[in-house]
Image (cartoon, rainbow, N blue to C red):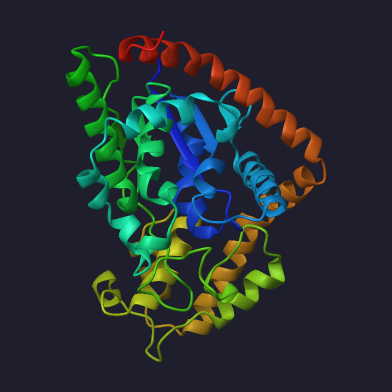
């Protein structure tokens, strides 16, 4: 029996951070055991908003290096950048003609990103959920690891697959299934426990980047927003304290512990004592990853070759699927 085929991607826009690692990348590493994994640096999605070309190239290599450093095996899994495989763009155009405007108008992420300036954003930003569907369906991926903010896009990919199959009277695209990997680690900003940690946040103090030095990590954790109360004695005591809950969640995830275990260990103590322990754990877990990233980035030729090889392997899967898709549509 063949392994389930997993597809997932990450944008090369700025530094990857602790939230990316705990929420996604760490799980991608685990999925390699028992799944056929295709991991993509989605540079075509990145240009839905303006990117400096040199910065985009640098960020693409940096993301690839971070994935390899975190444990993605480029020989066992497929690691490449999206623009290397033409099937993404060609399938996306076909899906532009399958998806309905009303479906895209309901996409909450577009509303958030476009804000009040909807008339001036790129067509690509509006239509990028169709490209996301193409990313998945171009490989007939069966499973997609998703967080809360991506569930709507996966539902759209399923809708597009089903409508394509219905329109042409053929079972061509399998509707992809969400891959839920236990309780998601939702990492929030170090400056505001009610907002998700984000690389687009103006304050670098809001996140721990995977490129941060031990001194950077120590400084950011020490300055992380807290409250004046002693640490709680129960998990329930964290519910009204978003910053404390966030730090406990991060500490637990880094140590593969439950939040309840961390609460029990630090019940009634002061934040200063907890932050010291959290710093030691974060540095211990992240420093080897950061060191390996820097080693890889010192050899851009190696990273480029990994992406080239991955692109060729990805294309070998996608090309015959695209050819069949074109035949179904009526392209000759």
The residue located at (47%, 53%) in the rendering is 22
Asked whether residue 33 appears in the rendered view, the answer is no
The mark tally for this picture is 0
Q: Position of residue 65 (x, y in %)?
A: 67, 43
The percent position of residue 144, horizontal first and vertical second, equals 36, 35
In-image side of 301 versus 217 (left or right): right
x 40%, y 38%: residue: 132
Position of 212 relative to 233 (above/below): above
Q: Please state, as top left, top right, bottom left or bottom right, where the N terminus lies in the image.
A: top left
Question: Left or right: 327 with respect to 313?
Answer: left
330 is higher (above) or lower (below) than 89: above
Residue 64 location, x and y as percent? 64, 41
Quarter-of-image position of residue 283 = bottom right
Residue at 59%, 19% (x, y): give it.
313
Of residues 297 and 324, the one nearer the viewer is: 324
Q: Whole-percent x and y of residue 44?
A: 53, 41
Q: Nearer the viewer, residue 39 or 131?
A: 131
The quarter of the displayed image where residue 311 is located: top right
Task: Give the residue furthest to the bottom.
Answer: 228
**Nearer the observer, 130 or 290:** 130
Above or below, 243 relative to 330: below
Q: Nearer the viewer, residue 238 or 180?
A: 180
Q: Residue at x 53, y 83 (%)?
A: 272
Q: Is residue 309 visible?
A: yes
As drawn, 70 above or below 205 = above
| Quarter of the picture holding the C terminus | top left
């Amino acid at each position: 029996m063949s392994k389930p085929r997993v597809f997932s991607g990450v944008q090369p826009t700025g530094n990857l951070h602790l939230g990316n690692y705990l929420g996604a990348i760490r799980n991608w590493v685990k999925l390699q055991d028992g799944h056929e994994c295709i991991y993509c640096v989605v540079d075509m999605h990145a240009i839905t908003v303006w990117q400096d070309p040199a910065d985009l190239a640098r960020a693409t290599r940096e993301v690839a290096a971070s994935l390899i450093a975190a444990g993605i095996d480029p020989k066992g899994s497929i690691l490449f950048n999206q623009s290397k495989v033409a099937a993404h763009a060609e399938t996306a155009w076909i899906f532009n003609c399958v998806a309905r405007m009303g479906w895209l108008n309901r996409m909450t992420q577009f509303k958030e990103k476009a804000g009040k300036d909807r008339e001036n954003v790129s067509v690509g930003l509006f239509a990028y959920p169709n490209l996301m569907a193409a990313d998945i369906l171009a490989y007939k991926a069966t499973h997609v690891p998703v967080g809360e903010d991506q569930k709507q896009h996966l539902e759209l990919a399923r809708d597009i697959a089903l409508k394509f199959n219905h329109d042409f009277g053929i079972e061509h695209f399998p509707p992809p299934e969400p891959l839920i990997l236990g309780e998601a680690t939702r990492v929030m900003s170090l400056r505001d426990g009610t907002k998700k940690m984000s690389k687009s946040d103006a304050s670098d103090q809001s996140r721990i980047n995977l490129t941060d030095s031990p001194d950077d990590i120590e400084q950011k954790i020490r300055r992380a927003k807290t409250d004046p109360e002693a640490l709680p004695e129960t998990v329930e005591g964290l519910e009204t304290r978003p910053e404390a809950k966030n730090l406990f969640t991060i500490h637990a995830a880094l140590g593969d512990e439950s939040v309840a275990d961390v609460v029990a260990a630090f019940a009634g103590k002061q934040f200063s004592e907890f932050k010291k322990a959290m710093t030691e754990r974060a540095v211990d877990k992240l420093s080897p990853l950061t060191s390996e990233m820097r080693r890889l980035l010192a050899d851009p030729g190696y990273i480029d070759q990994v992406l080239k090889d991955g692109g060729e392997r990805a294309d070998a899967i996608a090309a015959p699927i695209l050819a069949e898709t074109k035949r179904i549509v009526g392209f000759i």
